[in-house]
Image (cartoon, rainbow, N blue to C red):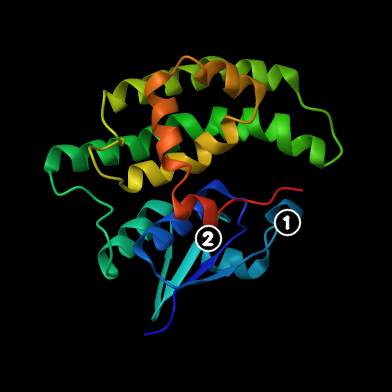
Amino acid sequence: MADPILYGPGFSTYVRTARLALEEKGVRYKLEEFDFLKGMPAEQVARHPFSKVPAFEHDGLRLYETCAIGRYVDEAFDGPDLQPKDPRQRARMTQIFSILDSYTYGPVIGKCFIQRVVTPTLGAQPDEAVIEAALPEARKCMEVLDDLLDGQAFLAGDALSLADLHLIPIYAYFSVTPEGESILKDKAALQRWWQGVRVRSSVQATQPQLG
């Protein structure tokens, strides 16, 4: 059986989520990187018709969309389960996917992190108005996620799941911005969660390189 191939830059939050799933399962894989900040390569557009990352290939199967990739990795390979068996916890995991994709990524990464961290590396000044406008929604998302932890070790119960792997790259980037640091300082459940997951070998192995 051939090793799976993941296409996309290691600094992408969604690429990192897929890598975290592969690392947690102990799957050997190949990462084919490119810098989409310089333009999306034509071959990636052929793999992903919406010109996003990541894309994934394994034994003739081609996939895009991170949730689909994560579920396939969990179900197709041996290793620890990354999806809860309990239907309530599984539903919570899926709910968290939607919260992160629909409401969190845009203000937290697309606006705050990109403006505060990425834009200066491209030689431009952050747009403070864009950052300021993103903060109410970013704050609300972190409050919701903090509440959903509700004394649990992980987002969907007492075991690590794909929900945690979805949040880890987003939290890691947001926490290094001054806005993220301010919003997260009183989120005790999220802070406790982060201290637990940040030392995992999968998280250490997928540390992104920026700049």
Residue 152 location (% of width, % of height): 26, 30
Residue 70 falls left or right of residue 90: right
> What residue did someone put label 2 on?
49
Residue 25 falls left or right of residue 50: left
Q: Which residue is the extreme one toward the right?
A: 123
Q: Residue at coordinates 48% horizontally, 72% vertically from top-left? A: 29
What is the distance, in whole Å, between disc 1 and disc 2 at their CAs? 15 Å
Q: Is residue 19 above or below residue 5?
A: above
Residue 3 location (% of width, % of height): 44, 78
Q: 202 or 103: nearer the eye?
A: 202
Q: Label 2 neighbourhood size at 10 Å, few (<14), some (14-19), many (20+)?
A: few
> What residue did someone put label 1 on?
39
Amino acid at pointer 2 = Pro
Q: 202 or 37: nearer the eye?
A: 202
Which label's residue is closer to the chain start, 1 or 2? 1
Residue 17 falls left or right of residue 43: left
Q: Residue at coordinates 26% horizontally, 23% vertically from top-left? A: 150
Residue 107 location (% of width, % of height): 56, 27
Amino acid at pointer 1 = Gly
- Is label 1 in contact with label 2 (beta carbons under 8 Å)? no
Q: Label 1 neighbourhood size at 10 Å, few (<14), some (14-19), many (20+)?
A: few
> Secondary structure beneath disc 2?
loop
Q: Is residue 52 above or below residue 158?
A: below
Residue 104 location (% of width, % of height): 47, 30
Res. 42 image quadrant: bottom right
Tally of numbered discs: 2
